[in-house]
Image (spheres, helix red, strand yellow):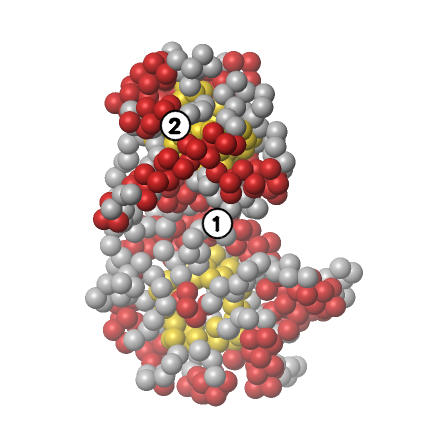
């Protein structure tokens, strides 16, 4: 950027540029964050995995409809030079998860600290908050990028793309920064505000161009800016985005009719009371399909023979727990487990393919544990599934038994090293002794959390029920209850436990005296609800 004449008051963009240039130089000269340090970290593959910004921008909740709406680029913005404070107490991670679950294709995170009150930590935490979603949004580092160093930072902190502002960069710098971003796997969002800047962006070969309705020199908004530039990209393989000033469904509709394929919205979303509802209203997306409440699932643990498995399966067991723990009287040998597995696997293979119907699932995204539950419940035609319950085995033993028996699910204790879980090739249930363990609701690692009432501290079941119900109510995200499996269910406690906790599944143990009657009666009682 050309330095302003001393007699001329610098514009807002020039002022921000000058400050960010100083900030970058400080960061580059700080031990541990030099350009060489960042190169080394990138070389160690410490940057989180990328997704394609271009491809993700093409998908939104209306993509399969006859008249799809533009995709949403939802912005996290605490303040701005023109509006001052907007949402100073905003939690970037929570806001990102809300945006993602509402259907945003891209989440834009402002990382400029002085005028916009953002940070790279916001970017990292926002990214972490949605990493476990099956189709997470792409992340944009919304920043005044003037140096390759900032692009390397963006990549390390979880961005999938960065913003390049044509008005702020010389043709040479624009080309160099664009090329460097591509070398890190990130297709940039190139921002323009007029026809000459659009020409530069097109000559650059940009695949995604955003028209900023706000002039960054004086911060005045002209909603017609995007409309005047639409024809310059018509018939080109370019995704055109409208940026800034969008606050109503009417604004979005106008741009949709003109061929705009994405809209970036920040302030209006940050001020919204019901963010998800406001997003549906803005984009005219349909109300999400409500999930039909499924019957409670039951896992019967302690199965040691085919006969026991068949009996409880006929009574409605969804999961058969095979205990691999020499300390338990219900320990099953590898040979017996393989026999049980062979019986039920042959039963599955004999089913007609038509029996494996596609279970319709809600169209909305769901946080980690809810999505894992949905995935499992979609396998209803293959029931019962086989769960290996492990005690004090090593990881290699768990992997050997899982493969030999062809287990569908593995259950481990909370004390098992968390790093083991990602190496187990089937979904993992993690058994917890207390609901107050924060790991019970940590997403992205184990697939299911089981709270074992029989191991509750001090045997205080009622207190355990209340604590568990608080975990469920707190949820894994706003308006998303935490799904848990309740273990240690008995004839004496199941009615109260289910009423207070509302689990999606329960575990019943076959008595060590091998009396199947009590377990069968309890199973039937749970299934009746």
Q: In the drawing, does residue 144 fall left or right of residue 463?
A: right
Residue 301 image point, x, y percent = 44, 25
Residue 227, above or below 444: below
Residue 199, above or below 441: below
Question: SS class of the residue under badge 1?
Answer: loop
Instruction: Name the residue carrying label 2.
Output: 306
Residue 356, above or below 311: below
Residue 313 image point, x, y percent = 32, 28
Q: Earlier in the sequence, mark 1 or mark 2?
A: 1
Residue 484, above or below 168: above
Q: Residue at x 32, y 78 (%)?
A: 227
Question: SS class of the residue under badge 2?
Answer: helix
Q: Residue furthest left?
A: 66
Residue 11 visible to an observer of this rendering: no
Q: Residue at x 52, y 68 (%)?
A: 161
Q: In the drawing, does residue 436 fall left or right of residue 255?
A: right
Residue 448 image point, x, y percent = 46, 37
Instruction: Report the Cα–Cα distance between label 1 and label 2.
Output: 37 Å
Residue 213 image point, x, y percent = 40, 73
Residue 478: mark in rendering: none
Residue neighbourhood size for the residue with mark 1, other residues' Cα within 10 Å, grouped as few (<14), some (14–19), many (≥20) = some
Quadrant where the image shows the C terminus: top left
Between residue 88 and residue 321, name the one nearer to us: 321
State which mark lies toward you, 1 or 2: 2
Instruction: Name the residue carrying label 1.
Output: 132
Q: Residue at x 27, y 46 (%)?
A: 356
């Amino acid at each position: 950027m050309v330095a302003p004449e001393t007699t001329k008051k610098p514009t807002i963009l020039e002022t921000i540029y000058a400050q960010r240039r100083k900030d970058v130089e400080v960061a580059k000269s700080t031990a541990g964050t030099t350009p060489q340090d960042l190169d080394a970290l990138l070389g160690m593959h410490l940057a989180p995995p990328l997704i394609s910004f271009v491809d993700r921008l093409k998908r939104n909740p209306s993509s399969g409809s006859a008249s799809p709406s533009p995709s949403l680029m939802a912005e996290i913005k605490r303040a701005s030079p023109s509006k001052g404070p907007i949402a100073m107490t905003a939690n970037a991670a929570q806001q990102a998860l809300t945006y993602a679950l509402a259907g945003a294709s891209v989440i834009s995170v402002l990382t400029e600290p002085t005028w916009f009150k953002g940070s790279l930590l916001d970017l990292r935490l926002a990214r972490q908050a949605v990493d476990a979603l099956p189709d997470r949004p792409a992340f944009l580092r919304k920043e005044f990028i003037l140096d390759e160093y900032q692009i390397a930072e963006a990549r390390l902190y979880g961005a999938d793309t960065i913003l390049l502002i044509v008005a702020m960069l010389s043709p040479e710098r624009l080309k160099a920064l664009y090329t460097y971003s591509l070398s890190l796997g990130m297709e940039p969002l190139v921002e323009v505000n007029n026809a000459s800047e659009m020409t530069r962006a097109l000559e650059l070969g940009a695949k995604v161009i955003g028209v900023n309705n706000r002039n960054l020199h004086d911060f005045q908004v002209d909603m017609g800016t995007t409309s005047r530039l639409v024809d310059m990209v018509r018939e080109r393989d370019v995704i055109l985005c409208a940026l800034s000033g969008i606050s109503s469904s009417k604004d979005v509709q106008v741009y949709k009719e003109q061929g705009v394929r994405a809209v970036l919205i920040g302030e209006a979303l940050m001020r919204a009371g019901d963010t998800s509802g406001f997003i549906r209203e803005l984009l005219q997306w349909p109300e999400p399909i409500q999930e039909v409440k499924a019957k409670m699932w039951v896992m019967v643990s302690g199965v040691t023979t085919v006969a026991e498995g068949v009996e409880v399966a006929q009574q409605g067991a969804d999961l058969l727990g095979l205990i691999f723990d020499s300390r338990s009287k219900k320990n099953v040998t590898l040979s017996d487990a393989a026999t049980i597995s062979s019986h039920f696997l042959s039963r599955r293979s004999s089913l007609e393919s038509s029996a494996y119907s596609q279970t319709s699932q809600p169209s909305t995204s769901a946080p980690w544990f809810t999505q894992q539950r949905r995935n499992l419940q979609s396998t209803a035609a293959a029931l019962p599934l086989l769960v290996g319950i492990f005690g004090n085995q090593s990881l290699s033993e768990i992997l050997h038994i899982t493969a030999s028996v062809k287990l569908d699910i593995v259950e481990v204790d909370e004390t098992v090293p968390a790093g083991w879980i990602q190496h187990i090739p089937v979904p993992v249930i993690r058994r917890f002794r207390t609901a107050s363990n924060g790991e019970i609701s940590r997403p992205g690692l184990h697939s299911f959390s089981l709270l074992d009432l029989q191991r509750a501290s001090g045997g205080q079941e009622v207190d355990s029920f209340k604590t568990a119900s608080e975990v469920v109510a707190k949820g894994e995200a706003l308006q998303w209850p935490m799904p848990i499996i309740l273990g240690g269910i008995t004839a004496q406690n199941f009615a109260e436990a289910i009423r207070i906790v509302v689990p999606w599944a329960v575990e019943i143990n076959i008595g060590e005296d091998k009396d199947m009657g009590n377990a069968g009666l309890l199973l039937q009682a749970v299934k009746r609800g």
